[in-house]
Amino acid sequence: MPDVDARILRLQQGAVTVILLAGFVFSLHWMIPAAAVLPGLDAAFGPRGPTPRFWRVVLAPRLGAPQGWDTAAGARAQALCVFGALVVATLLLLGGLDAIATLLAIIVAGVSASAATGLFCVGAEIDRRSRPRRRGGSDR
């Protein structure tokens, strides 16, 4: 898979973070499944998903060439991790466990914020660790 502009993943994860934190601040539990839609669609459709498409059509022409790249597999792994955790949080909401669902959503917001700022990306770490190591050398 080709590498993708790192700003696309940061846009997606930043949007998820804002949606989840707004839901927490305003006590809107329905924001948890709403936040799951974007990474779910992006993971399912890849470069044809809503975030990459919005990036290419609206933002990329105005912002210029990318300075950083992510692997497509790492970006997809991040989207899948966030989507999976938010699906679990949604199921907890449906089961009446609002406090646990909210706690999980706050954790996901932290993970998404970390990926959005470029500090640490769970998906990139999963991608890095799942690659086969070279014999006799380091994996860096």
Image: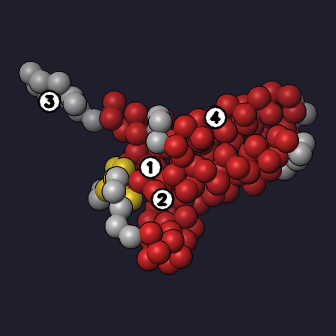
The kind of secondary structure element at disc 3 is: loop
The answer for how far apart the CA atoms under marks 1 and 2 are is 9 Å
Q: Are marks 4 and 1 in contact (CB under 8 Å)?
A: no
The answer for how far apart the CA atoms under marks 4 and 1 are is 17 Å
User: Can you tell which quarter of the image residue 96 is in?
Assistant: top right
Q: Residue at x 17, y 24 (%)?
A: 138
Residue occupied by mark 2? 8
Residue 94's x, y, as percent?
86, 40
Q: Residue at x 12, y 24 (%)?
A: 137
Residue type at tag 4? Gly
The kind of secondary structure element at disc 4 is: helix
Query: Along the line of sight, which residue is nearer the eye, 61 or 130?
Result: 61
Q: From the viewer's perspective, is the residue at label 3 or at label 4 nearer?
A: 4
Residue occupied by mark 3? 134
Graded by Cα atoms within 10 Å as few (under 14), some (14 to 19) or many (20 or more), the crowding at tag 2 reads: many
The answer for how far apart the CA atoms under marks 4 and 2 are is 18 Å
Residue type at tag 2? Ile
Which comes before the other along the chain, label 1 or label 2? 2
Q: From the viewer's perspective, is the residue at label 3 or at label 1 nearer?
A: 1
Residue type at tag 3? Arg
Which comes before the other along the chain, label 4 or label 1? 1
25 lies left or right of 82: right
Residue occupied by mark 4? 110
